[in-house]
Image (cartoon, rainbow, N blue to C red):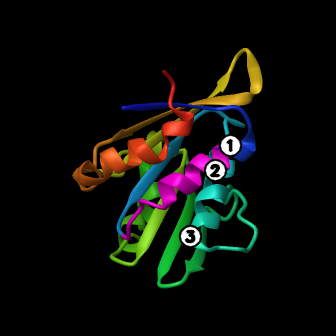
Amino acid sequence: MIELHSSSPEQTRALAAAIAGLARAGDLIVLAGQMGAGKTAFAQGFAKQLGIHEPVTSPTYTLVHTYQAGSTVLHHVDLYRLDHTAEVDDLALPELLDDRSIMLVEWGDVVDLGPHLHVELRVDDDDLDAREITLTSSDRRWAPRWERLEAALQSWTLS
């Protein structure tokens, strides 16, 4: 587990960029947290690091936004409005995640999506601009990158 502190949306974007620098095609990253916790800010920083220059907004109503980043495709998914596992199944997310794509899933903790990097964002009760962010992984593909991930996020690590 890696525990981080971000004091602003800009820092949340920066730490997401650090994670994106270590992400690989085939990675599934689940973004969890209450409304307004910074999931979309995270996605914006992640996308920018991949070289995506178009605006990145929450796909709450369209459910999936897809961006081309060189030879990599970023799928940004939002499951907030879905009520049933069958609705998630209809999105065919496993078919979207392939050996040339990365998937960020907001509200992805509401269903079992399989092995993933889990990013939980929480609003700091003492500073509403700040976020406490916890990273865990159920995806063994992150194990060889974990030490590099810790090093890349050192600036935001809680002591």
Tag 2 residue: 14
Q: Disc 1 marks which amino acid?
A: Gln
- Left or right: 36 as drawn, with respect to 157: right
Q: What is the spatial separation of the Cα atoms under label 3 and label 2, in whole angstroms?
A: 12 Å
Residue 107 image offset from top left, x and y in percent: 54, 44
> Marks 1 and 2, Cα distance to the nearest angstrom?
5 Å
Q: Which mark is residue 38?
A: none
Of 14 and 74, nearer the camera is 14
Residue lying furthest top = 126
Q: Picture coordinates of residue 75 (x, y %)?
A: 53, 68
**Element at label 1:** helix
Which residue is label 3 attached to? 50
Q: Sequence order check: which comes first, mark 3 or mark 1?
A: 1
Asked if residue 154 lies left or right of residue 58, the reply is: left
Q: Residues within 10 Å of mark 1 (few under 14, many from 20)?
A: some
Q: Secondary structure at mark 3?
A: helix
Please say if 33 is above or below 44.
above
Q: Which residues are magenta?
A: 12-25
Q: How many marks?
A: 3
- Give the residue at mark 1: 11
Identify the image quadrant of residue 138: top left
**Proximity of marks 1 and 2: CB atoms separated by less than 8 Å:** yes
Q: Is residue 83 magenta?
A: no
Residue lying at 40% horizontally and 48% vertically, measured from the top left: 149
At a point 66% along the width and 50% down the height, the residue shown is 13
| Residue type of the residue flagged with mark 2 | Ala
